[in-house]
Structures are given as C-alpha cells and as structure tokens.
Amino acid sequence: MRITGLALVPPPTAADLPQVTPELLASVLARYSRSNQGIAAILSKVDLANPDASIDRILSFVDYGHASIGGLTGGLAVALDDVSMWLAYKIFEIATMADGQESSTRYITMDAANLPTAAELGIPDDLAPRWSAVMAKSFAAYHAEYTRLDALATAHPGLVRLPPDAKPAVVTRLRKNYALDRARYFIPLATRTNVGLVQSSRMWAMTVKHLDSLPHPEARAAARLIRDELLKLSPRLMRHSSAEQSYTAQAAQELATSCALGLDRLSAAPLADEVWVHVDRAAPPWLPATQPVAEALRHRANRYGYQGTATRRMRVTFAWNNLALAELRDLNRHRTGHRTTPLIQAGFYLPPEIAHAAHAALLAEQLELTRELLQRGSPAYVYSLLLGAQTPFEHSTHGDKFIYEAELRTGLGAHFRYAEHLSAALREFLHQVPEARAHVVEGTAEPE
C-alpha cells in the first residue's frame, strides 16, 4: 500500500493572492467569522514567512470546535495505491462528502500476484493456504471465462450490442468489455486497486478515525498512512483522527451482525431479483408541498438539470436483496444519503452466458472458506468473497438524487446488470409516483 498527499494552492499567475497552507486558510477564516474587519485586514496581520506562528496566534484568540474549522481547509487530495477492492469500497462508504475515483476493473492486473498477502489482510495463519488456493482458482476461472466469451463474441458479432457504423477499434473494445463484464464476477474482492479522494481536513479526520476503529489490519494501516501524510498539511486538525470508542463499538456490532446474517444466508446458488422502494412525501403543515412533481421535472434538458422542490424534498429509500459486489462497488459511490449493507454472500450471481455448474467445485470451496471465517467471527471473511457474491443493499436519499441515479445507471454505456437493478427500482418508484413517468428518462444501456 502506498499513499500520496496533495495540497491545492492558487495558480502561480495569481501573484496578488497569498499562498497559504490549508491550516492557515482555516485559521484565517475562523478569525474572519469573529471579526468585522474584512478579510484583507486579517490577512495583513499574517506572517506568510512564519505561518505556524500566525496560526497559533489566531487559534489562541479564537475559540472554535476543530470539526467546524477543519471543513475550511479546502480540498486535500490523497491517492492510495495497491489497496484491496474491499478497502476502496469501505472508504467510499465512509467518506460520504468526498469526490473520488477508483481504478476500473478494466485496467488493473487480474492475477493472484495482485493480491495483498494473507498476513496484511489478517487471514488466520491456518487458513492462509486455503485462501491463497481459492484466490488462484478464482483468477483462473476469470481468465478462462474471459477467453471463452471473447472468442464467442468474435465468432458471433451479433452477441455484442454495437453503435451504428462502429469502427473496428470500437468493435474490439466493446467485444473485450462484453467478455470482461461477464467474467468479472470471479474477481476476488481482495484484488488490489487504486483509489483517490479529495475532501476537507474535517472529513479526512473523520474518515481516518473510522478506518482506525475498524478491526481490519488493512484499514488501520491505511489510517496510519493517511494520517502521517496529512499531518504534513494539517497537523493541528488531523490530531483528532485516532480510533474512538463510539466508532469501535459500532464496528464490532456491525461485524457481529454480518457474521450472524452471513451464516444464516450463506449460499452459492443465485438469488432471484427482489426490489423494495419506499417514497415519503410527508410535509409539515406550515410548509406544505405545493409544487406538482411534473413541474419539478419538466424543465430539465437532461439528468443534470435542476429539479424543483417536489422531488428535492421527497425522501426515497430503495433496496435490493441481491446486489452483486461487482455492482455494489459502483452504486456505493453515489454519495448522498446513507448506504447500508451487511456485505455477505446470500447468493452468487453469474450472468446467463456463464453456467454455475461449470464452476460448482470452485464456488463450493469458496463458500466453505467463507463459512469458516464467519464462524470464527473473523473480519477477514470479506477477503474470501468474490465479486459475484450477492448481498442486500439499501440506499436512503432524496427523490432528485434517485432520479439522477436511475437515469444515469440505465443510460448510455451503463453496465447491463446496473440497468436491470435500476430499471426495477425505477418501475416501483413510478408506481408510487406516477406523475413523474412522463419526465423521467429510463435508458436502454445502449453502448457508448
């Protein structure tokens, strides 16, 4: 695991703007909020040659909570190389206000050599050989299916949906994507990837505190690396980023719940699709909802258009019983609201082009390894999961955000399984909010 921290500063051409560190920016704005002098007067008292002294002088005068001022540090960018897909998923779950990106599965190495060691992940020593063997067989299944599907699509071009007049390079790319998008369910969740996020010191402190409170060695190692890097940029504010009892207690309870539910529902058989949507339009009597839903939506030119109060105030919770981890990794990045999953294997999804029976031995072996880790209450059970593992997943947000996600995940270039899940949720949403039907665009996941 490697880490890089980046601080955003004004461009070199802006000679009239002071070059300030994130903490100096936060302290100046803290003083600004407790003064009527104006920002220029406050900046005139700052010694840019000795910013630490200026920070200490301001902070000795200003009484504030570190969280409220930590949010004033601007965007602090951190890139983490070679973390597991599980840790990347967890960071996105925790960092609900971050902007970020993760390496696509189309560009990372699909090989057992691209896994952290069993010791790094906290795999029990006596299970490490079994874990390594299952991971190697999973990658072998991925490569076998990828090769088979690529050859099948080459021999039968009609299998792959192509845009009109597609050039040969586009045809090749979409054929490769067709094979990868169906074979990827054999990829281990422990596979190394890269993730980068930008957020304020306040949110980084919360993220690091949460990671440091988890029982996974990989999460705690990441917390130390991130803290050490950000202490260079925001030393005073990142001091509030160590493990804390409320986080530790909740993490322990969530692990216990996942282990119990995981053992109860553990299966390698595919789960049938179920979707659940709850729409809440309740409003206080002194602020009634007066705008029609159609009026909130009809002015948009596309999904990026601004929606009215009728959908922005509407609470929407949607959930699936069987979201494969391959889809979870992306749907989990829709930041607004809260996302909840026990992260278990309640079934195993493979697309129709791949027969479960052909991989029954691997799936049985993987399932028994997961069972053993769950029975021990080991947090490392997450690293025995493959991307085809199906888990319940719930997302609570607002109507405008749900509509955006449904249009995005069924639209141009959407993965076929995203489109199936979001189409099902959208149908149920429109059943409960029929007046939105004429103004919400469900896509057909047509190729890019």
Image: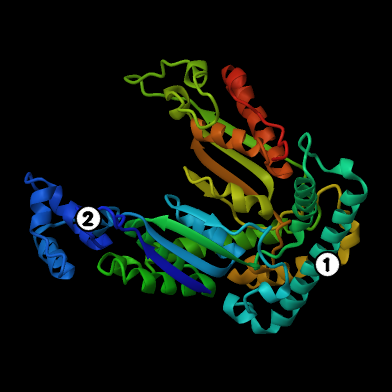
For discs 2 and 1, the disc positioned in front in the rendered view: 2
Left or right of 172 on screen, residue 7: left
Which of 57 and 270 lies nearest the eye of the viewer? 57
Q: State whether residue 72 is above or below residue 163.
A: below
Which of 195 and 332 lies nearest the eye of the viewer? 195
Mark 1 residue type: Leu
Pointer 2 with pointer 1, Cβ within 8 A: no
- Label 2, on which residue? 15
Q: Can residue 315 be seen in this view?
A: no
| C-alpha distance separating marks 2 and 1 | 62 Å
Mark 2 residue type: Ala
- Label 1, on which residue? 362
In what element is the residue under mark 2?
loop
Q: State whether residue 87 is above or below residue 119.
A: above
In x, y percent, where is residue 33? Answer: 15, 47
Left or right of 195 on screen, residue 154: right
Q: Tally the numbered discs.
A: 2
Q: Which numbered tag is attached to residue 301?
A: none
Classify 10 Å Cα crowding around label 1: few (below 14), some (14-19), many (20 and above).
Answer: some
Q: Residue at x 49, y 38 (%)?
A: 397
Q: Which of marks 2 and 1 is nearer the N terminus?
A: 2
Q: Residue at x 59, y 47 (%)?
A: 331
